[in-house]
Amino acid sequence: MKHEVVIAGGGPTGMMLAGELTLVGVDVAIVERRAKAELVGSRAGGLHARTLEVFDQRGIADRFLAEGQKAQATGFAGVHFDLSGFPTRHPYSLGLRQNHIERILAGWVDELKVPIYRGIEVTGFAQDDTGVDVELSDGRSLRAQYLVGCDGGRSLVRKAAGIAFPGSNPTTSNLIAEAELAETPPEWGIRRDALGTHALGRVEYEIRNGKIVYADHGPVGVLVTEQHVGQTTEPTLSDLSAALITVYGTDYGIHSPTWISRFTDAARQAASYRKGRVLIAGDAAHVHPPDGGQGLQTGVQDVVNLGWKLAQVVKGTSPESLLDTYHAERHPIGVRVLRNAMASSVLRREDERTKALRDSIAELLGMDEPRRRFAAMMSGLDTHYDLGEGHPLLGRRMPDLDLVTKTGPLRMFSLLHTARPVLLNLGEPGAFDIPPWRNRVQLVDAKYGGPWELPALGPVTAPAAVLVRPDGYVVWVGGPAQPGLADALTTWFGPPTAA
Ligand SMILES: Cc1cc2nc3c(=O)[nH]c(=O)nc-3n(C[C@H](O)[C@H](O)[C@H](O)COP(=O)(O)OP(=O)(O)OC[C@H]3O[C@@H](n4cnc5c(N)ncnc54)[C@H](O)[C@@H]3O)c2cc1C
């Protein structure tokens, strides 16, 4: 069986990549170990602003917004940020559990008719000059031009590719579970002590006036820090009960768990996101403490960066070297996420010195500029790929402007729904002509009279024209007389072809 691309793992990262590739006509298949699409249990609690924007760029943000609850949920070191004044259409986070996020993504890839080999594992692979033979647990194999490991933190693809995963070992261990409690705890919510952070709350909740209001009945989500680090066996109900008794003095008669999982504060990042025809993304490329709720967001954004590049290489429009920009751009983002998640996890400690440090940082974050910068970082809105000197928009996200074209009003992001690049001319209509790229790049004449403002940076000079990649990042800014457009088009969307 053959596909142009095979994705190992159909979690949020794998599904997003499959959608991205399918939108631009790549024959892609997912191999997913889980027999059923439903995610048992839940990890991520929602989506931050940039992830919502990225979904909006593909026209699917409304599906998440319809089910989630808007909240100001970004923060650092216990300080909460309010994104209300931020120049984005989504100046908030969305409370929505990972099982729902995955269900909505699964609906999207289903509509796009992505084939999924379910209940099957990738067990190994062999790559040669023209492709990869992917071995499956049912004895079959798949041939693909590229294999992408979106197979989570213990990624078989990463290990089999021999990609190093350097980082730090765990210093704390947590159990997370969903179960029934025979007794109602006197108080729901977060508790912190010398051991670490713990939390009890009904799985179902509502956000009323910015506050979480838990449902009166139903299963309970449990988070509890364990006394010891380094357990290697699968966690059990008695582990959970023992950990609760240590912290709360009782296990509240916990029973009937639907899932129990263990996570730690280990932080590791792949030394390389690519080895020949094998790439990795999401948790397969980086693991870190859940502080700041950034894992799923980073994985989704990894593959929005990778998808269109891989498509162009598979279709022969761009040379293979375009794939090197995936590591070059996304590895530094991972470094930053690991850094802030590690720092945050340490700042959770309850000893006097850590409290003093946390209070000092809170004081700094009370100041306008640091607060804006950290809010932009934690929401992902400050993502910046280093594309050299130039206009502040270069390498940054294109804002979702309300444009006016000759056919009427249009949102910038709607131009990205098909995952195709855009040359947006905001000056004299017809001032640009790009015949060799006409089939690959949308040339749009539009007017925009509003302000130009970037999160954290503030107002920037209005550009005459911008070249925007399918992932929504600006790679060229200028006017018709400005040099460099042909070079940028070649670098990002392949060499010119006869018109
Ligand atoms: C307690 C906790 C809270 C979190 N909270 C947040 C949060 O609030 N916000 C946030 O953004 N992130 C959060 N995260 C992180 C988030 O859950 C992960 O970053 C996210 O699930 C990563 O997605 P992924 O698709 O890369 O990997 P995974 O979700 O791990 O998916 C990998 C998939 O690959 C499949 N698979 C594995 N091996 C194979 C194989 N060999 N062959 C075929 N299939 C395979 C698995 O079955 C799985 O479906 C949290 C994590 C934890 C533990």
Image (cartoon, rainbow, N blue to C red):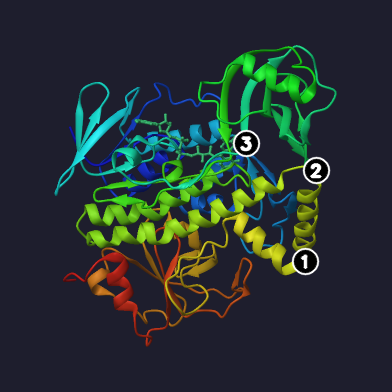
Q: Is residue 264 left or right of residue 300?
A: right
At label 2, which amino acid type do we have?
Answer: Asn
Q: Residue at x 62, y 54 (%)?
A: 378
Task: Tell me: is circle 2 under 8 Å from ligand 1.
Answer: no
Of labels 2 and 3, earlier in sequence is 3
Q: Does residue 358 lie above or below 364 as drawn?
A: above
| Residue drawn at point x = 14 percent, y = 49 percent | 129
Given the current orientation, which residue lies at the most extreme bottom position? 481
| Residue named by callout 1 | 367
Give me the C-alpha separation between circle 2 and circle 3: 34 Å
- How far across and how far down the image is residue 135, in percent? 23, 30
> Label for residue 209?
2
Q: Residues within 10 Å of mark 2 (few under 14, many from 20)?
A: few
| Residue kind at label 3, given as amino acid type | Thr
| Of labels 2 and 3, the one closer to you | 3
Q: Of residues 26 and 175, which is closer to you in this image? A: 175
Residue at 73% in and 43% down: 349
Query: Which residue is labeled 3 in the image?
Result: 172
In this picture, is 283 found above or below 236?
Answer: below
Q: Is residue 64 visible?
A: yes
